[in-house]
Image (cartoon, rainbow, N blue to C red):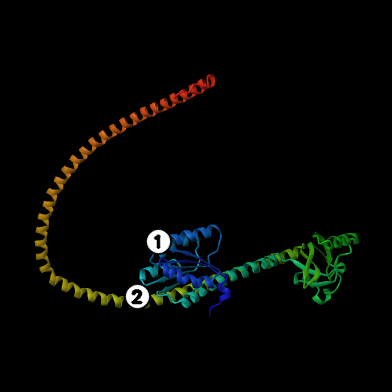
Amino acid sequence: MINVEFLKKLTILYVEDEDVAREKLAKTLNRLFKKVYLAPNGLEGYIQFQKLHLAKTPVDLVLSDINMPKMSGIEMLAQIRELDKEVPFIFTTARSESENLLKAIELKANHYILKPIDMEDVVLKSQEVCQKKYYERMLLLKNQELEQYLKALDNVAVVLKFDEEGNITFINSSFLESFDKNEDEILNTSFRELIHTDISKEVIDSLFEIINKNKIWEGDLKYLSSDNNPFYVNSTIFEIEENNKKLFINIGFVSTKENLEKREFKKKVLKNIQEQNQKILIYKKEVEELRLKISKYENIIVLLKEEIENEKKKNQTRLNQLKHLETEKLTFDEKQEHILKAKNKQFEDYRIMLAKVKKEKEALLEKTHVLEKELLERKLDIERKEEMLELKRKRIEDLNDVVKYREIQLKKLDPSIILN
């Protein structure tokens, strides 16, 4: 069943060289997935993935054709694997080619889908491989979170919680061991009562004053066990909120030699547990990978058998065609020899004619060079004459301006003078 809510969290890269097929499937993918990046060939697909990788934009799935120009899907997968060893990969292909499929398996491709593409099959297989990757990632995060808790336990911390009045609401087993008391004897008693009388009231009051200001108090506190043996705890006390209630938590480490030895022992035990759990996870992953490989190889064997049968049929057809061609070959050779002689004669005629045309062309080129030279000289002569005409025209204009100026001066001297 399609999990639409899950698919809406995923970003995919779809690579297909057929424009119509790419646009058609992209419409469906865009409706279901969070983001769909498109590329028209393997090279563009790799460049797109590289850009997203450098921008730290996660790609949850690559869906790609195998046979494409510029860079095939297999070549693109090999390049992408250098950047990302784990990103899920699904191939679409028009034919089942064993060599390509084996190479795809070596490069950790997750699935292949035969064309024509079934939309639901694409979506379900995409969901399947992404869910597996998602659960692996969630498991890793949970393990990391668990490791953080284990680290806290590794330190063999003594922990207790108390409310604003100082009443103890929680105490861990390590602290109980130090007091040599059971939980009922400690819970709901006052934190102040647990502290050794050697610690002055002023120090305790100062401690409460600091933590009530939502600040952290750090220091050594002295306690007394049930058999009156004092012990010291290097404590860190700070405010927390639990179930909408203000509490304080005391996390510390017992300083006696015996407790230090216990702490180290527990560290080793927990470390050993962690290592064993890690090994179990690794073995489970390896078993799952082997199971998937076996399943893929079983599918490939079926496809290889089909391919062998198809090749046998094709070979028989080719053999029949070869026999027919051999029968026709003798007649064809005779015709070919006759045609070859005719073509040789025709070629010789063409060669003679070509030599003649070449000679005529050289003569025309020589004549063209002479004409071009003459044309250039005439052009330069025309340009010189035009420059001279322009100078004369400007000279005439200057003289006309002088004449007009003189006429104006004469009119001013004697208005009765009219110059024609």
Report if residue 88 is visible in the image.
yes
Task: Identify the image quadrant of residue 7.
Answer: bottom right
Of residue 207 and residue 276, the one placed in the foreground of this image is 207
Of residue 90 and residue 284, the one placed in the foreground of this image is 90
Q: Residue furthest right?
A: 201
Mark nearer the viewer, 1 or 2: 1
Q: What amino acid is at disc 1? A: Met
In this rendering, position of residue 302 left or right of residue 286: left
Q: Residue furthest top?
A: 413
Q: Residues within 10 Å of mark 2 (few under 14, many from 20)?
A: some
Task: Tell me what residue is drawn at x 33 percent, y 78 percent.
Answer: 306
Task: Tell me what residue is drawn at x 24 percent, y 36 percent.
Answer: 371
Q: What amino acid is at disc 2? A: Leu
Of residue 271 and residue 95, the one placed in the foreground of this image is 95
Residue 304 shows which numbered tag?
A: 2
Q: Secondary structure at mark 2?
A: helix
Read off the residue under disc 1: 71
Q: Residue furthest front?
A: 416
- Eyeballing the image, is 91 above or below 415? below
- Eyeballing the image, is 383 above or below 292? above
- Which percent across, then down, holds residue 181? 81, 74
